[in-house]
Amino acid sequence: MTEETLAELGAALGDLHRVLRRTASQRTGRAALPDAQVEVLRLVQRQPGISVREAAERLGTAPNTVSTLVGELTSAGLLSRERDPGDRRTVRLELTAAARDRTAAYGQHRSELLAAALAQLDAADRERLLAAAPALSRLADQLAQQR
């Protein structure tokens, strides 16, 4: 493992993310959301009912930053905020139906784009990439925990 191969891996992953994000967003006919807003939506999707404070901790950012993002997403109709009945000071976050529809459409387009691109690769490359998916997920989890 050299600096060059690490740089190549990082660049390839970044390029793949950007191309998928732009193209899938274009196919949905909607402007892409900022990455920070997408991170909040994905977190709430994985952990419905999470509080703003908990979201800030998990994202490794300041609570006021997450609060601003939540405000923007709420104004856009993508998040709802509900007071926690056990602690009225705490707000719980949920995806709206519009957010669920948007993320489902976006996910479908991403899957279609990946499937089409993978189909153009030779079988050996395709198998190596698909076999690497679990390791890449673990790598992402590891990096997220290091925040």
Image: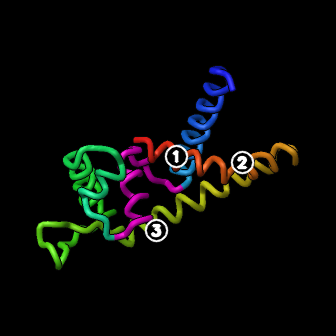
Magenta residues span 28-48
* Mark 3 or 1, nearer chain start: 3
**Drawn side of residue 96 relative to residue 42, left or right:** left
Point out which mark residue 142 bears.
1
* Circle 2/circle 3 CB separation < 8 Å: no
Label 1–label 2 contact, CB within 8 A: no
Instruction: Identify the element where label 2 is drawn.
Output: helix
Looking at the rendering, in which quadrant would you find the N terminus?
top right
Residue 15 versus residue 49 in the image, above or below: above
Label 2 belongs to which residue? 132
Q: Residue at x 43, y 58 (%)?
A: 42
Question: At which x and y percent is residue 27?
Answer: 56, 53
Q: Where is residue 120 shown, x and y percent of the image?
A: 81, 45
| N-terminal-most mark, 1 or 2 | 2
Closer-to-camera residue (42/146): 146
Q: Identify which residue is drawn at 49% across, 42% down.
A: 143
| Residue neighbourhood size for the residue with mark 3, other residues' Cα within 10 Å, grouped as few (<14), some (14–19), many (≥20) | few
> Is 44 displayed left or right of 128 in the figure?
left
Residue 118 falls inside the magenta stretch:
no
Tell me which amino acid carries mark 3: Asp
Residue at 25%, 53% in the rendered image? 72
Q: Nearer the viewer, mark 1 or mark 2?
A: 1
Residue 101's mark?
A: 3
The answer to whether residue 119 is above or below residue 147 is below
